[in-house]
Image (cartoon, grey):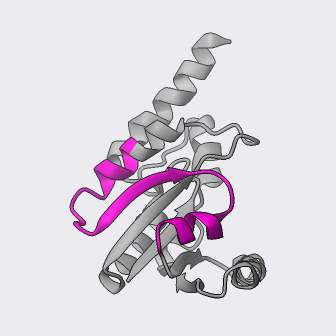
């Protein structure tokens, strides 16, 4: 069975990687769906996020990285994926994700959502928090894969030099 783990992954965190590794053990194929959302201003371009995810998941043979825009259920149907994978860090995540899963189910009854509780050591990690810490020069090495650390800092150094 094919599953999709959607998100912006801006940047990919160790929490994301934890969910990816666990879901890849559960499903025959795991598609990481990188949302191309034109209404947001991401730190990394879609292609940069694709490249980073390809690198950090290169050791997982059944993971495929694909970008998409539009509705997730349409993307899932196009790829013939019957499962959407979502990670939960806290009760507040569940409330939002539950609403989304119910909406998706109404839109396409062939697609279910599977929730993974984030491992305790990553329960507080988010891409937003990583960016906030990095913007102020803090150490993000405990939050993102090693190859992502300098790329995040480089983005903020570039922003500072352009001002």
The C terminus lies in quadrant: top right
Name the spot of residue 128 as percent of width and height, x first: 65, 52
Name the spot of residue 104 as percent of width and height, x first: 70, 78
Name the residue located 55 percent from the left edge and 70 percent from the top edge. Answer: 76
Residue 76 on the magenta segment: yes
Name the spot of residue 54 as percent of width and height, x first: 33, 50
- Left or right, residue 92 beside residue 76: right
The stretch in magenta equals 51-80
Q: Where is 10 relative to 71, above or below?
A: above
Front-lying residue, 143 or 72: 72
> Residue placed farthest to the top in the image?
162
Front-lying residue, 129 or 39: 39
Q: Where is 57 relative to 102, above or below?
A: above
Front-lying residue, 49 or 107: 107
Residue 125 on the magenta segment: no
User: Image quadrant of residue 109?
Assistant: bottom right
């Amino acid at each position: 069975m094919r599953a999709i783990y959607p998100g912006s992954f801006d940047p990919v965190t160790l929490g994301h990687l934890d969910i990816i590794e666990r879901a890849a053990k559960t499903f025959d194929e795991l598609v990481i769906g990188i949302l191309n959302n034109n209404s947001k201003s991401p730190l990394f371009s879609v292609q940069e996020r694709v490249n980073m995810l390809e690198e950090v998941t290169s050791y997982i043979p059944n993971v495929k990285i694909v970008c998409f825009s539009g509705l997730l259920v349409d993307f899932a149907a196009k790829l013939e994926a019957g499962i959407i994978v979502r990670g939960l860090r806290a009760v507040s995540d569940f409330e939002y994700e539950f609403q989304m899963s119910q909406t998706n189910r109404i839109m396409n009854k062939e697609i279910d959502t599977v929730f993974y509780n984030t491992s305790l050591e990553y329960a507080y990690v988010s891409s937003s928090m990583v960016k906030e810490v990095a913007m102020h020069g803090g150490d993000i090495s405990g939050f993102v894969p090693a190859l992502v650390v300098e790329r995040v800092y480089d983005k903020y150094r570039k922003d500072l030099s352009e001002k």
